[in-house]
Amino acid sequence: MRRRTFLASVISATGGVLLPGARRFARAVETLQYRGTIYATPSRGDIVMAGDLTRLRTQVNDVRARYGLAAFQWTDPVIIPQETIIKAVHVQELRQAIDDVYVRLGRPLPLFDALGPPIRYRDFGDVQNAVTVIATQPYAGPDVVIKEEVFVPFLQWYVDPFGVTRQCLTFTGCWTEIHASKSLLDQIQARRDTTLLANGLQQRTMPTMRDYAIAWGIAVTLEAGAVLLMAGGKISQAGLLTIAEGLAAGTVGAQVTLIAGGFFVTLTGTAVIALGIGALYVVWRWSQGPQVPVQQQSIRIEVSPDGLGWDVFEIGGW
Amino acid sequence: MPRLFVALGAGFALALALSWWIPAMAYVMLAFALASVVVALAYSVAAWSEGVQKIVVAWKAAPRRNRVIFGVTVFVLLAITAAALSLVPWSRLWAGYSAMVGSLIQFVTRIAPRG
């Protein structure tokens, strides 16, 4: 397309005077010298080459694979330069194959010109444009959803119990089982910057003041748990001793009173011990980092490979 | 005014000189807290053990009538307690507690959201 436009602009600018040969050449490019079933003297770079068709087929199949469609079965699967005869069905198949992707994504179908003869470079260019539109889009739909262990050290968005959307960062990242499309995972894992981001987080080994604050919080929580455990133990002990006293008491009234009182005091001590264990549980849970049920929440992964902007991937949600 | 600067400089130098205290104190506190938990667990178990031992001794020394009264009373108390505890919505309490803990953890481990 660009070659044709360039040639046409040069020819029109010069009025066809300086480049009469080029004008004929451009017309030849325009019609692609398609006569019947054979190319007449193809010249490299000016007309559709075997490589163009092969490359376009590969691109189309890549896009199809990305969206979970089977590879298209092409007529003349192997294009041999200067030997395979180009046919209208080759272009029709390309159009059909890319149309399938558009249908899959629920997008309006690309508009193609009526097909020749002659077959023109533009016919290929149109297919190329349709492929580019899809290939450069962020991933846009469900395809083969798989379950895979992936390293997710990135920014996590989640909805907390109060319904507030929050963004959090795990300390070192985590291996998480997620449901996502294979192609999306490939797309993410193929990006070097995501790994760099993960490494950048993992390399944060120097403790900061924030870490000391966290250590302080953990220590205080543990200490509270220890105090509760000791207090609960002491209360329970008093209750149990009261029960023993009741067992040895002389009258029925004293027995029942002491046993019942001791029983409930012991129960209270046990509850206090349970509170202490709860504090220990908080610390243990804390040490596990943020636990987000990622299978249910969609995760957004944001990467900025070149500092020019943020690409956003979304995992989950379907 | 110069005194103010001298005081500021001295304070800054002092803070710098003592800055190693912050991590040291953090680690000491953590170690102390961990040790406290171990001690508290041991203490709690020991307290229970002592109380139960006292009950066993009293049981052995008690006459039959006292043992019967003890058994009946404890059985009734257990029944009352079980009935009362069964009225508590434990699952909802647990859900609320774990949600609280979860949001607490998320809160202390998050970075500032960008809005």
Image (spheres, rainbow, N blue to C red):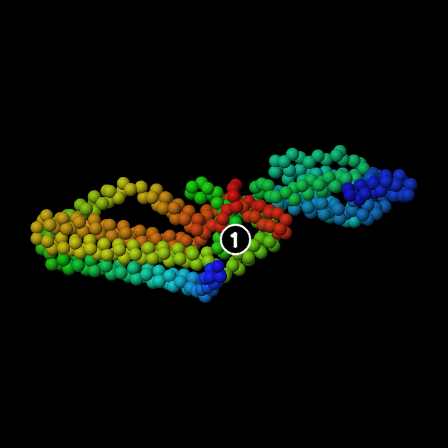
Q: Residue at x 79, y 39 (%)?
A: A120
Decide which of A225, A96 is in the foreground and name it. A225
Asked whether, in this view, residue A7 is left or right of residue A275, the answer is right
**Residue A67, picture quadrant:** top right
Percent x, y for residue A129? 71, 41
Percent x, y for residue B105? 42, 50
Using the rendered image of the protein, determine whether residue A286 is visible from the camera's viewpoint.
Answer: yes
Q: Residue at x 67, y 35 (%)?
A: A109
**Label 1 sits on residue:** A153
For disc 1, the neighbor class at 10 Å (few under 14, some 14 to 19, many from 20) is many
Decide which of A256, A279 is in the foreground and name it. A279
> Residue farthest to the left?
A251
Type of amino acid under label 1: Pro
Asked whether, in this view, residue A214 is left or right of residue A199, the answer is left
* Secondary structure found at label 1: loop
Percent x, y for residue A83? 80, 48
Q: Residue at x 83, y 40 (%)?
A: A8
Using the rendered image of the protein, determine whether residue B16 is visible from the camera's viewpoint.
Answer: no
Q: How many marks?
A: 1
Q: Residue at x 72, y 38 (%)?
A: A92
> Residue farthest to the bottom?
B17
**Residue A236, picture quadrant:** bottom left
Asked whether, in this view, residue B78 is left or right of residue A185, the answer is left
> Residue farthest to the front?
B1
Percent x, y for residue A144? 57, 44
Q: Chain of mark 1?
A: A
Asked whether, in this view, residue A16 is left or right of residue A291, the answer is right
Decide which of A4, A147 is in the foreground and name it. A4
